[in-house]
Amino acid sequence: MIYVQVHIKCTPAGGVVLQQEIAEYNRLMARDGGKPVANFTVRIGAGTGDQIHLFAYDDMADYAAAMDKMANDNDWAAFLQRVGSVSSSVDLSILRPLPESGLQ
């Protein structure tokens, strides 16, 4: 199992707009192959107001297949058009749990 962390750096009012879109974001990600694990808002510290989302994939091939589906998904393109202006950047990280982690 691998995890993808999506860190969305929000514009000043963007966090509120994105919070209203979390259900749709998770639905689209799940439809294209990601398994929603968690959605967070940074409350204190660096990036306060940003959002961090965690999605699970079986392996890198599963992740690549999901990205291919998303690239050709008109609903995903419409979603990005709708919320794109409320984020200043998006950073992705591929995470692999340590053997002792509860997430396997």
Image (cartoon, rainbow, N blue to C red):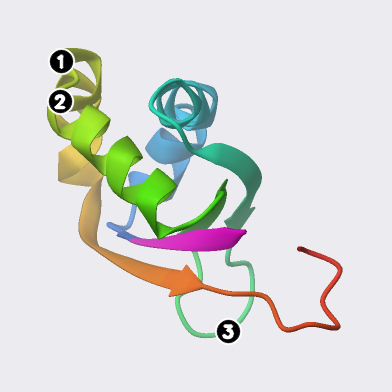
Q: Which label is found at residue 45?
A: 3
- Relative to residue 15, is residue 26 depicted above or below? above
**Where is residue 92 shown, x and y percent of the image?**
34, 66
**Where is residue 46 shown, x and y percent of the image?**
49, 84
Query: Does residue 22 appear in this view?
Result: yes
98 or 19: nearer the viewer: 98
22 or 43: nearer the viewer: 22
**SS label for mark 1:** helix
In the rendered view of the protein, which quadrant contains the N terminus?
bottom right
Relative side of 10 to 101, left or right = left
Disc 2 marks a residue whose amino acid type is Ala
* Residue 69 among magenta residues: no
How many discs mark residues in the rendered view? 3
Instruction: Quadrant for residue 2, please give it.
Output: bottom right
Q: CA distance from mark 1 to mark 3?
A: 36 Å
Range covered by the magenta-colored residues: 1-8
| Mark 2 or mark 3: whose residue is earlier in sequence | 3
Judged from this view, the residue extending furthest toward the front is: 61
- Relative to residue 87, is residue 23 depicted above or below? above
Relative side of 68 to 45, left or right = left
Q: CA distance from mark 2 to mark 3?
A: 32 Å
At a point 54% along the width and 24% down the height, the residue shown is: 23
Please say if the residues under marks 1 and 2 sit with CB atoms less than 8 Å apart. Answer: yes
Mark 2 nearby-residue class (10 Å; few <14, some 14–19, many ≥20): few
Mark 3 nearby-residue class (10 Å; few <14, some 14–19, many ≥20): few
**Where is residue 25 shown, x and y percent of the image?**
43, 30
Please say if the residues under marks 1 and 3 sit with CB atoms less than 8 Å apart. Answer: no
Where does label 1 land, which residue? Answer: 74
Instruction: Quadrant for residue 78, please give it.
Output: top left
